[in-house]
Image: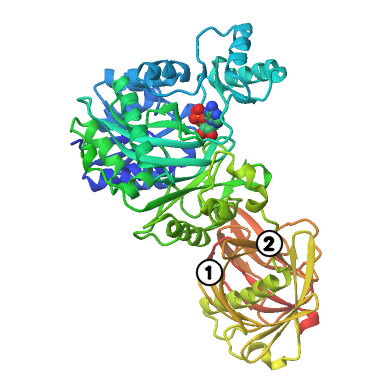
Amino acid sequence: MFNKILIANRGEIACRVIQTAHRMGIKCVAVYSEADRNARHVAMADEAFLLGPAPSSESYLRADKIIEICKQSGAQAVHPGYGFLSENTGFAEALEANGITFIGPPSSAIAAMGSKSAAKEIMSHASVPLVPGYHGDDQDPALLRVEAEKCGFPLLLKAVAGGGGKGMRVVEQMSEFDEALTSACREAKNAFGNPDMLIEKYLTQPRHVEIQVFCDQDGNGVYLAERDCSVQRRHQKVIEEAPAPGLPDEIRVAMGEAAVRAAQAIDYVGAGTVEFLYDVDGSFYFMEMNTRLQVEHPVTELITGQDLVEWQLRIAHGEGLPLQQDQIRISGHALEARIYAEDPDNDFLPATGTLRYLRTPEENAHVRVDTGVVEGDEVSVYYDPMIAKLIVWDDNRDRAIARMVTALEDYRIGGLKTNTRFLRHLANAQPFKDEDLDTGFIEKHRELLFPANNIDTQRNLAITAAYLLESQKAAAFVAGDPYSPFSRQNSWRMNSQYARPMTLIHGDDSHDLRILEQQDHYQISVDGADYQVSASLNDDALQVMINGHRLTVHLFQHNDSITLFHEGEQFSCELHCERFDGGDESSEGSLTAPMNGAMVAVLVEAGQKVAAGETLVVMEAMKMEHSIKAPCDGTVSDIYFAEGDLVSEGAQLIAVTPDEEA
Ligand code: ADP
């Protein structure tokens, strides 16, 4: 076996490969861009080398540098992951020329499948069924029109060099053909440098079913069952599962055998995926072959009990197939959900930002999380916005779905927009449970998947207020000030008639709260609605009793913004000091640290009366001083840090009780 390999990738797949390599006693070399200096894959590897600036063209696509690093580090083989250089024939050839093993198929096999039309030609000779249509070289628009007429409508124009759903157009009738052709060619030319199109009959309710194949270097091939990837948005996969629900055994075998024939027709070696469209009448058609490990490979691993990266490494090293076809068994059902930084409510627009808060479900025999990020990491514009893959397994599909729903509820991400709520509604949707699957699923069930929020705003605000009070108490306790009013059991009860005001802003609305602390609970009124709340905070988990209902919610605060998580739903609001009319959101007036830094001066004492705008404490961060000023006239009720203390962003520094309260 190899002693050392290089992983020419980043993110979750780099981490995934390193994990198996380490289990097999293989050392790993990571490569990274300037944006990924502190990335998880860099930390996990035994050593790591800088490739260059953040853009992929200057880093992860630099084949020359990667080969140089292999030589320098002594890596004997390269795992390309998916994307980047994984299906680049030039890279595979260059490695070969330098005596380094490419953990993937021979470059000739990549080339054969690189063009969808050439691939279809090869498949037709290998008796693999094809979607009817035209995949010739002649691209004369007049000829294409004739072929379109022959094919019938609706039809699909597809870029020969396509990928990722780009350069595809559905054409409903002849009158739309010319325009669709022009725009699809233009898009394909821009995206792939090749405007050539093929024409396919457009199946209106197909399922996307794909077969995982493996071939060894002696030409033996097996298939490891199938995956159903029908749930898609913009022709891209969202939820994948294995096995495909309701797929008859004889079809599984026929598809599997066709896939192995497809692979053998191009002298394939290693892991590959043959994608089929599976039509309502039970027929299936070859779509394309991906000559790499797929994003969704974990569902196959969970139903077969095999580690596909281990298979790849063994085969690349020259070993035979780990199992023969009759030794491959499938058990139970697995689902994978792709967790993306994106906005499902805004046409799935990719999102960027900092993962300020990240809590993942507990991993066990039923739940697996493949990820390349940790809390505090940035999701940047440079790379794919996938945050993680959440994979679940259970004895049957119903139970696997239930696991998925729970795991999604336990997946809490704050700081940027993600699709976790959407995924939960998807997994919970009755038509999904009923296996009513086809590639139009999301469009068809739009209303069900994007339900209106029916959140009880007042109630959530009351809970948020209880959280703020509890976390202030906890902060005072941690700061070790036994004289802090928060540390004392009877703090404000000294004047318990006094109702503390608080203003929280949710969306565009400002809500006034009045909080009266009683012996063992808070009496909180929100816009006139009364809540009796008792709460106890443990890390980010708040156990609340609100008007007799006991529940656990999770909250996270960043500066003045608080997000509440409950059963997969999120609720955010902003804390606003009633008297402070800051207008713009400057850090002045906020009593929290604007960034990580040090406390350089404490200018007031507890109990001191201060006027609005008076400087209370001074912090230094990034070599600059920031004054924290009194938001209103009042009395300093607490100081949580001393001069010289290091404070982290968002930490409350000082508390001022507005005059009205005193
Ligand atoms: P890409 O390589 O860009 O991902 P594919 O050929 O893999 O393109 O197709 C992506 C998706 O488009 C498929 O999963 C399927 O949903 C849809 N699709 C492709 N071909 C057809 C077809 N002939 N009829 C209906 N849908 C299709």
Q: Quadrant of the C terminus?
A: bottom right
Given residues 232 and 174, the one toward you in this image is 174
Asked which colour scheme the image uses, the reply is rainbow
Q: Which mark is residue 88?
A: none
**First-in-chain label (1 vs 2):** 1
Residue type (three-letter) at the residue carrying disc 2:
Ser
* Mark 1 Cα shell of 10 Å, populated few (<14), some (14-19), many (≥20): some
Q: Residue at x 63, y 44 (%)?
A: 444
Residue 397 percent location from the top left of the image: 43, 54
Quadrant in which residue 312 is drawn: top left
Quadrant in which residue 80 is drawn: top left
Under circle 1, the secondary element is: loop
Tell me if I can see residue 469 in this picture.
Answer: yes
Residue type (three-letter) at the residue carrying disc 1:
Asp
The residue under label 1 is 540
Residue at the far front: name it: 281
Q: Is residue 101 left or right of residue 83?
A: left
Q: Which mark is residue 627?
A: 2
